């Protein structure tokens, strides 16, 4: 069970800051000559928000030098000192103040009391680097940076107060109990002074903490979302940890990594909360990815068990020993997959049928067997050495051979791989026919299944011929549209469209609009392949279970390469020195990585991928027939976005 407290982030100050920026963004983008928008320092302690804004060309800057009248400056939620406002006004720079209203009140109080000759003391957080929390630094700027800053009770012992009138204020997100303790100690030590203490800690974080603790008491785990440098997030984590095991995360990848190494299932009670700058969207995405993970883990365990049993039945001791050996090699590869296609097939069936039975399992096994078969062929085409962390079938044979005739050994090893891949295709057909032979919908299922295979092979044909034409036939064009067609035919059809829609067809529900799902899962499949191509260059080969040199040595045509080819001729000549080399070194890979970054190809690919993922999310949210599975699909989409292999 997943629990979300009654009150979570964002606080009003964070919400107001984001609203100001997005209103400015919408206003400027409608203009013929929009002004550049920048934020002075980090808008919030929230890397997700900062990254989202960066994708809209709104950046956080650390210096106002070089900022001119064609730029709009937004002052961050934590606030700034008086000197920053003076600089902006003096230089006639348009600016908008996103400072939290509670922080602005502190600025006013400090300014007023400072010029009434009060000693100013600010109770606030000292950071590990020796600096103070941004809010504290900003507040100090309203008394010409002359405030004395206290972070813990021990510092009161060395505090030197000269003036007779003293003002004490607090950082809004400072722990209230600690702040009161520090203020009380100052009052007792300087009882002869006129000390005015104003408790300026904010109610927002306190309410978030209160309701988080209520949830924590009934949960096995608490997930606390927020920036690593966020004081209120750290406080929230500390409080929840005293009640139940808790984890502090700043993004979905960290959540997923935690899920992968934690023993949880559908009976586990998990609470989700977030710091004051965490947006409601982040809380919801966290919930969705946990729901997906729990569904995925359960389904994957079931499918793995069925596939293991199926693989055992394939081994027939009456077969020729050569055939037995070949089938053993096939069953070795026919395990350890991610089983995402089975999960999608399961979702399609359950959504369309409204049932939770296991009628779809044989079709899922058939689809996984088909996938293994096409990967065996793909490995031969790409001359790959690793698949799912194991030797590919041709490599396994070559290790087995004792002949010194390397050329002949390679030919035979590849030939056997082709035979085994072919065998897998017909084994998949056999599973479908044996398990659904009495199903009135069998012809439709086979027709759609064949359509998936035909489209996949069409995509593979283009994928094989395109790099050859460009590298050896001196074809003078590298069209992105051709690459997108490969992504659509080869990846989307057999990775996302095919399995989900096949599951829907098995349910035999005439009300299900297959064409609508084909369009939604097309976007998801293309985004999946762009992510794969990025991982194929920038991933860790030990982690992903296959080489990161294969795409390069095979001169694979990806959106990364086509971008450089069509937009960056100055980088293309240098790229072609390395891209397509048969023996790619580690230093070659590093050079290629840098070229894709410097040319803008990586950024372009990521933006295109994110747009497709976002479009898929938008389309799924518009559907009203998904029920509890909507969150699971949304979680799946974000998993595909953040995955590292």
Image (spheres, rainbow, N blue to C red):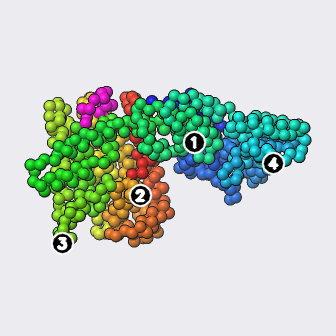
Q: Is residue 90 above or below residue 218?
A: below
Residue annotated with mark 1: 226
Say which label, 3 or 1, has the lower sequence index. 1
Task: Left or right? Give the position of 261 relative to 315.
Answer: right
Classify mark 2: helix, strand or loop.
loop
Give the Cα separation between the discs numbered 3 and 1. Answer: 60 Å
Give the Cα separation between the discs numbered 1 and 2. Answer: 27 Å
Classify mark 4: helix, strand or loop.
helix
Classify mark 3: helix, strand or loop.
loop
Residue annotated with mark 3: 405
Say which label, 3 or 2, has the lower sequence index. 3
Magenta segment includes 485: no
Circles 3 and 2 in contact, beta carbons < 8 Å: no
Residue at the spot 60% in from the left edge and 39% down from the top edge? 238
Residue 446 place in picture, x, y as percent: 19, 39
Residue at the spot 17% in from the left edge and 55% down from the top edge? 326
Q: In the picture, residue 464 is in which quadrant?
A: bottom left
* Frontmost residue, 353 versus 316: 316
Residue 466 place in picture, x, y as percent: 30, 61
Residue 104 place in picture, x, y as percent: 74, 39
Residue annotated with mark 2: 540
Instruction: Give me the disc on residue 158.
Output: 4
In the image, the segment drawn in magenta is 348-361
Give the Cα separation between the discs numbered 1 and 4. Answer: 34 Å
Residue at the spot 39% in from the left edge and 71% down from the top edge? 577
Residue 586 place in picture, x, y as percent: 41, 67
């Amino acid at each position: 069970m997943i629990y979300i407290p009654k009150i979570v982030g964002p606080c009003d100050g964070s919400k107001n800051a984001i609203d100001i920026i997005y209103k400015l963004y919408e206003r400027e983008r409608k203009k013929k000559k929009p002004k550049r928008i920048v934020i002075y320092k980090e808008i919030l302690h929230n890397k997700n928000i900062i990254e989202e804004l960066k994708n809209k060309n709104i950046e956080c800057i650390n210096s106002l030098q070089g900022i001119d009248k064609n730029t709009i400056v937004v002052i961050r939620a934590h606030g700034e000192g008086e000197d920053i406002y003076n600089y902006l006004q003096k230089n006639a720079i348009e600016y908008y103040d996103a400072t939290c209203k509670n922080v602005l009140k502190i600025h006013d109080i400090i300014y007023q009391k400072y010029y009434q000759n009060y000693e100013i003391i600010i109770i606030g957080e000292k950071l590990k680097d020796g600096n103070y929390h941004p809010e504290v630094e900003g507040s100090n700027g309203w008394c010409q940076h002359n405030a004395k800053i206290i972070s813990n009770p021990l510092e009161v012992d060395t505090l030197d107060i000269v003036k007779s009138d003293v003002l004490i204020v607090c950082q809004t997100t400072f722990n209230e109990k600690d702040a009161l303790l520090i203020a009380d100690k100052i009052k007792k030590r300087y009882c002869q002074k006129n000390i005015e203490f104003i408790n300026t800690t904010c109610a927002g974080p306190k309410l978030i903490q209160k309701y988080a603790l209520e949830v924590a008491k009934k949960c096995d785990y608490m997930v606390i979302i927020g920036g690593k440098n966020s004081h209120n997030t750290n406080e929230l984590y500390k409080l929840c940890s005293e009640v139940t095991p808790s984890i502090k995360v700043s993004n979905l990848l960290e959540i997923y990594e935690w899920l992968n190494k934690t023993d949880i299932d559908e009976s586990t009670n998990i609470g989700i909360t977030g710091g004051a700058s965490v947006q409601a969207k982040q809380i919801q995405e966290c919930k969705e990815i946990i729901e997906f993970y729990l569904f995925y883990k359960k389904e994957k365990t079931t499918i793995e068990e069925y596939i293991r049993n199926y693989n055992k039945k394939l081994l027939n001791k009456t077969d020729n020993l050569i055939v037995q050996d070949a089938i053993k090699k096939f069953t070795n590869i026919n395990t350890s997959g991610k089983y995402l296609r089975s999960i999608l097939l399961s979702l399609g069936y359950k959504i369309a049928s409204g049932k939770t039975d296991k009628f779809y399992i044989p079709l899922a096994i058939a689809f996984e067997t088909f996938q293994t078969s096409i990967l065996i062929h793909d490995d031969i085409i790409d001359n790959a050495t690793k698949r799912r962390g194991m030797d590919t079938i041709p490599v396994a044979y070559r290790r087995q051979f004792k002949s010194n005739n390397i050329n002949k050994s390679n030919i035979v090893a590849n030939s056997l791989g082709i035979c085994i891949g072919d065998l897998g295709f017909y084994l998949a057909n056999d599973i479908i026919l044996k398990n659904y032979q009495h199903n009135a919908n069998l012809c439709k299922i086979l027709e759609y299944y064949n359509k998936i295979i035909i489209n996949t092979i069409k995509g593979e044909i283009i994928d094989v011929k395109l790099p050859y034409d460009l590298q050896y036939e001196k074809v003078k064009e590298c069209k992105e549209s051709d690459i997108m067609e490969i992504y659509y035919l080869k990846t989307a059809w057999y990775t996302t469209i095919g399995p989900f829609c096949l599951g829907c067809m098995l349910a035999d529900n005439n009300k299900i609009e297959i064409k609508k799902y084909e369009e939604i899962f097309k976007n998801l499949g293309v985004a999946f392949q762009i992510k794969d191509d990025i991982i194929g260059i920038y991933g860790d080969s030990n982690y992903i279970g296959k080489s990161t040199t294969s795409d390069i040595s095979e001169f694979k045509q990806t959106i990364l390469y086509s971008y450089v080819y069509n937009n960056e001729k100055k980088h293309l000549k240098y790229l072609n020195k390395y891209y397509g080399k048969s023996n790619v070194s580690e230093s070659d890979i590093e050079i290629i990585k840098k070229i894709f970054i410097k040319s803008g190809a990586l950024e372009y690919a990521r933006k295109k991928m994110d747009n497709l993922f976002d479009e898929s999310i938008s389309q799924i949210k518009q559907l009203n027939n998904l029920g509890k599975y909507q969150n699971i699909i949304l979680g799946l989409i974000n998993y595909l976005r953040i995955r590292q292999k």
